[in-house]
Amino acid sequence: MSVHTKRRLAETARLFAIAVAVFVAILPLIWVVLASFKTGADVSQLPPKLIFTPTLENYHRVLDAGFAAFFRNSVLVTIAAVALSVGLGVPAAYGFSRLRVPGGKGLLLFVLSMRFVPYIVFAVPLFVIMVRLGVVGTHGGLIVVYILINLPLVIWLMKSFFDDVPTDIDDAAAVDGATRAQSFFYVVLPSTAAGVACVTILSFIFTWNEYLLALVLSGRAAQTLPVVLTRFLGGMEDPVRWGLLSASSVVVLAPVVVTTLLVHRYVRAGFGGTQA
């Protein structure tokens, strides 16, 4: 067997392995999407039916159950938390990267340590504090909590992006008469657009999908979609309503998938350390 043939076989085997891995990864998603269009009788059959008459009954029932209100809660909390996390974290990361902050390394380590501990550990202390402040079950309370959790990730990731930008461009901007703020907004920040997109989508995914803190702190008025999904899981005597659970899961997944597809080029560039 020639070397060329061996290389072709190896490449074919690699592509086959990738195809199998991708299929296994998306198989649960395919099952959920198909189940959302099935009737209760079809969705419970084993093995799953691949040929069936699609129906929108599950989506109608989900919307009739007040799902739109909880969708608005998720949209409001996510947009506000992500915008404020990025808006506060990016300038802070720039300060850590460019300015001599007294005890900066220790402060950075403290910020990162907030991500070392599973965030559910903070649920009880946060609940007690929010009860005393009277913000349990409000959008504002949940937004503040998500900002505190997202900020360490935004600061640390963006600091690495700012560190990769040569300080010479800051000096050149200063020579041209630019202030520190002008240098940040008009010179350095555009150079890290891929990093900003990266931290934004990561913060969005975490905030949109977060369940445990929302379960404890959101109450009824500010309840988000991941918490509402548990309504269709049944209980000790009630069966799982697979059709409704699948339809509501598709509604929850759709914004994340659409957003990721829209900005995937920037996210890939951010993780790859190159500009999009």
Image (cartoon, rainbow, N blue to C red):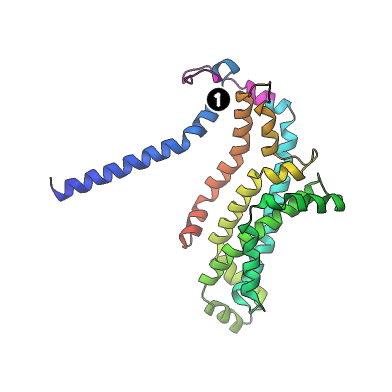
46 and 170: which one is in front? 46
Residue 64 at x, y percent in the picture: 73, 25
Q: Specify whether 266 is left or right of 217.
A: left
Please determine whether, in this image, residue 124 is positioned above or below residue 67: below
Residue 66 at x, y percent in the picture: 75, 30
Please determine whether, in this image, residue 231 is positioned above or below residue 202: above
Residue 52 at x, y percent in the picture: 50, 17
Q: Specify whether 83 is left or right of 242.
A: right
Q: Specify whether 36 is left or right of 231.
A: left
Image quarter of residue 149? bottom right
Query: Of all residues shown, which one is farthest toward the top?
Result: 41
Residue 134 at x, y percent in the picture: 87, 50
59 magenta-colored: yes
Label 1 belongs to which residue?
Answer: 35
Q: Secondary structure at mark 1?
A: helix
At 68% from the left edge and 58% from the top edge, which residue is drawn? 85
273 magenta-colored: no
Q: Is residue 95 visible?
A: no
Please determine whether, in this image, residue 187 is positioned above or below residue 79: below
Question: Label 1 is placed on what type of residue?
Answer: Ala
Circle 1 packing at 10 Å, graded few (<14), some (14-19), many (20+), is: many
The span picked out in magenta is 43-61
Check the picture and name the quadrant holding the N terminus: top left
At 57% from the left edge and 81% from the top edge, which residue is drawn? 171
At 68% from the left edge and 21% from the top edge, which residue is drawn? 238
Query: What type of secondary structure mainly makes up the magenta span?
Result: loop
Image quarter of residue 69? top right
At 65% from the left edge and 56% from the top edge, which residue is drawn? 150
